[in-house]
Amino acid sequence: MEKSAATEMVNIKINGREYAVPSGITILEAARIAGIEIPTLCYLKDINEIGACRICLVEVKGSRSMCAACVYPVSEGMEVFTNTPRVRAARKMNLELLLSIHKKNCLSCIRNTSCELQTLCNEYGVDDEYFSGENREYQLDESTPFIVRDNNKCILCRRCTAACSNLQEIGVIGAEDRGFDTHIGSPFEMKLAETSCVGCGQCVVACPVGALYEKDDTQRVLDAIDDPNKYVVISAAPSVRATIGECFGYPPGTDVEGKMVAAMKRLGFDGVYNLNFAADLTIMEEGTELLHRLENGGKLPLITSCSPGWIKYCEHYFPEFVDNLSTCKSPQQMFGAVIKTYFAEKNGIAPEDIFVVSCIPCTAKKFEIGRDGQSAAGVPDVDAAITTRELARMIKSAGINFRELPDEEFDEPFGIGSGAGAIFGATGGVMEAALRTVAEILLGEKLEKLDFYDVRGTDGIKRATYKIGDRTIRVAAASGTANAKRLLRAIESGEESYEFVEIMCCPGGCVNGGGQPTQPASVRNKLDLPALRASVLYKADSEMDLRRSHENSAVKRVYDEYFGEPGSHRAHEVLHTFYVKRGIY
Amino acid sequence: MDNTSILSTRFYGGQKRVALRNCGIIDPENIDEYIAVDGYQALAKVLTQMTPQQVVDEITKSGLRGRGGGGFPTGRKWQFAMGGEPGTQKYVVCNADEGDPGAFMDRSVLEGDPHSVIEAMAIAGYAIGASEGYIYVRAEYPVAVKRLELAIKSAREYGFLGKNIFGSGFNFDIQLRLGAGAFVCGEETALLTSIEGKRGEPRPRPPYPAVKGLFGCPTIINNVETLACVAQIINKGADWFASMGTEKSKGTKVFALGGKITNTGLIEVPMGTTLREVIYDIGGGIPGGKQFKAAQTGGPSGGCIPKEHLDAPIDYENLSAIGCIMGSGGMIVMDEDNCMVDIAKFFLGFTVDESCGKCTPCRVGTKRMLEMLDKITSGNGEMEDLKRLEELANYVKSCSLCGLGQTAPNPVLSTLRFFRDEYIAHIVEKRCPAGVCKDLLRFTIDRDKCIGCGMCSKVCPSNAIYVTDYTAPGRRKPSYAIDPEKCIKCGACRDTCKFGAIEKK
């Protein structure tokens, strides 16, 4: 659609009141301008706009049937009614029909109080037995370590399949069978673990109800804490502090690092550490790796490896790029490896007696901890990866009053993280962190400006060229597998060339990860969540004195006392890994 | 052979075959025979003597409306797709996915006169500025598929399809796409989605296909029967077509006559013909001396026309006024031995099977409606169910995403409107007045008529018939009786009894 310089406006009426709204927007958007929230279930802006659930139906004067507000465009003179008896009766009946095919165990459901269906049912005073009848019983799909699918709760809004097919352009789940027997699944009723699912969890955060959720590892963590023979440590990933507040009523974009640390300490962990420290460590190893490849004609572009969803995607869909991947473990894994080697040796604790937990915004990390090549001390580097949501649940069920907590600091010796480490959670953050270190090494001097604005922001693919000394370094940062695909194809065809590429599996980076707090569509459609959450990280970075990974004293100490220097033999044994070419089928 | 004698029979005499004019007359696999009956003359005329706008105007003037069921003015649909930047990719699509059970109007045209469709699509392409067309034909019509393939091949050989047709500079070609057994793919947006290679599910409208259709391009989709009229409208003129029919519904309509009627088969009559003429003149009336009860029109999307509307002229407006639709032309005649609740259940069962599952009202609503009808016909219905059934029917009708869901409740709503007493009998009296619903049937032996031969007991497959103590006055043997617990209502006993002693009610 061509846009004229001045947006054309149309005059419409909503519930009898006049409004001038931009031409061509939907009734839903027009109503929002008028301050009215028409309920939706299947609508996810830019991802799933299919008018399927019919809960957003409104009356339009002159139209015999009701119109789906989420897809129906406004036109001059349109008269819309969002709250007539007919509309209200239709909504109620719609919800009652949905309830008749929905497993109603709200009290024990993971989405109790955050379920979009539950909220609407409450608002419309439905009778949940009015249309009871036959119901199919589906088996749970618990085949993967990261996601559980429960078709008994599915309301067939298709947001999950849209997230997988439209947003991520992967498409391992879709609608199977038809009519009343329609259910979400993979081709030939394959279990999710048999497919090329990368575990990104975008389907989980898209689901309005409890049909999709992360595999819960909180009990394992609690058992370890209760085990007197285990030394249990936890680290929090960079973006968790920017999002966990949402589980406690804070608006998106609130930095709650201090309270988060305080809460974790009160859960009984023996050590509460800052994963930003490990992010800095990753930069040391990866920066060295990049310089090494640049100097010795190694495989270029070097592609980052801290996103396990991206790694799995690369292994399945672009195995020809596996050799481009950095051999560095992700910060989560490096942290576990350091604890079970350096920390264990230094403190005389056997690695088998240490239980490492990482709190991450990611479902794919639950897969990463079980990979081969992730056990530097002969035992898994990381024992449990819990999502932001799981940590929030642990805090709540322990009766810890999050909002009343004082701000506390991470434990030493792994409490220090630089601003460069902090911005890992945003797309382009790893790139920027690496550039700060690599540039200063190449130039042999400190940079005046540490902000690499070209690689910031939530665009799908960001490209930049930097002249550093006599070197030209072309970089690209892509987030979301759809953008990764486009970028890799351009590189493959020779259309584009780079020295260094950052790829994050989730659109916008980890701040928009599959393990982050779920927000209802009404919030997702309105706010730019990735941008809001990322702003916390960039703000924290800008306010810190320590903004360079290579100036992190805790990192320097680990090298001094254990690894020697970045890229050393021991560093390679402990902090690096390998990958597998998997193929799609 | 004297053809006029066939044409003067009641069956053919009352018809006016326009869409079906060539069916059974020409060899559909021989393009020369189509040309011999003025085939491709219209295309030649259009390409050499008319502008695209003139073509659209002629179709509009004729009053031709979509024969697939929607009844949308064809000229207006083509008009919407005109315009835009020259060189914009556009498509002409023929909907040959005839899915109504018992409907075979389109099949006859595809099998009997495939070139009429091809010629019409080329004319449509010229009118709107499309160079490509698709015929989406259901795979369950293999003969039609074969004949279409042959026809397209011959048309290309003769230069009626391809580049620079008739030296006019106009290019047009057609591809076939086969359906895969989904009734819902007869819905235009689901059809387009299917051609695009995706799961055949409808899309919300607007945008309408004429603006944004196949692959996002302006597309017109027309039914086979609609297209079969196009060439003649061009050849004989819009006025000729408009001279037939009623004020708002011009031309003729093909109906597939079936059910309790003497002459079944395809008939084509001018719009405005009354139901009485169709059933009693052309159709030859109800066999077996039975009474007409209702005519179901429009297949699973339609309603029932009861006795009191026998003299209604059949056209789009009149049928709509009594809560019925013409649909694609299916017409099933019913007599006193048909149960209207059972009929509604039959059609609803079909739509429940065929629902694509995308929207809540159709996916869940129709299923729940069917469950209620099951309850009612099995003797477990309550008046509360009737209330909920009607509520749900109205809800599904006004809230479904596409025509399948929007019209699925029609058989229910229509029978509730005209035959509500039958529903109430099923619920309150636990009785099926027409004697159809098995669970409500009771077979009883009149013990005074029974002579005690025992033949019924011998043929009973479930050993439900036993000999009683009672011997009727004047009889030598004791009478038999049926145990209702064991009776499976097969009716074998009643069919066997020579003495009329077994009643079904």
Image (cartoon, grey):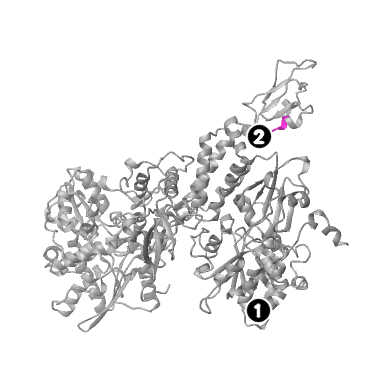
Q: Amino acid at mark 2?
A: Pro
Q: Secondary structure at mark 2?
A: loop
Q: Which residue is mark 1?
A: B50
Mark nearer the N terminus (1 vs 2): 1
The answer to whether B213 appears left or right of B46 in the picture is: left
Q: Which residue is mark 2?
A: B433
| Residue A118 place in picture, x, y as percent | 35, 46
Q: Secondary structure at mark 1?
A: loop
The answer to whether B265 appears left or right of B324 in the picture is: right
Give the class, few, some or many, for how many residues have Cα within 10 Å of label 2's Cα (few <14, many ≥20): many
Residue span colored magenta? B489-493
Q: Amino acid at mark 1?
A: Met
Q: Nearer the viewer, residue A366 or B293?
A: B293
Q: Residue at x 75, y 32 (%)?
A: B495
| Residue A542 place in picture, x, y as percent | 16, 68
The answer to whether B502 appears left or right of A156 in the picture is: right
Q: Nearer the viewer, residue B481 or A284?
A: B481
Q: Could you say which quadrant of the image residue B104 lies in? A: bottom right
Q: Could you say which quadrant of the image residue A161 lies in? A: bottom left
| Image position of A157 with respect to A543: above or below | above
Q: Nearer the viewer, residue A320 or B93?
A: B93
Residue B140 appears in the figure = yes
| Residue A227 place in picture, x, y as percent | 19, 43
| Image position of A529 with respect to A221: above or below | below
- What is the chain identity of the residue bearing mark 1? B
Gap in angstroms between the C-alphas marked 1 and 2: 61 Å
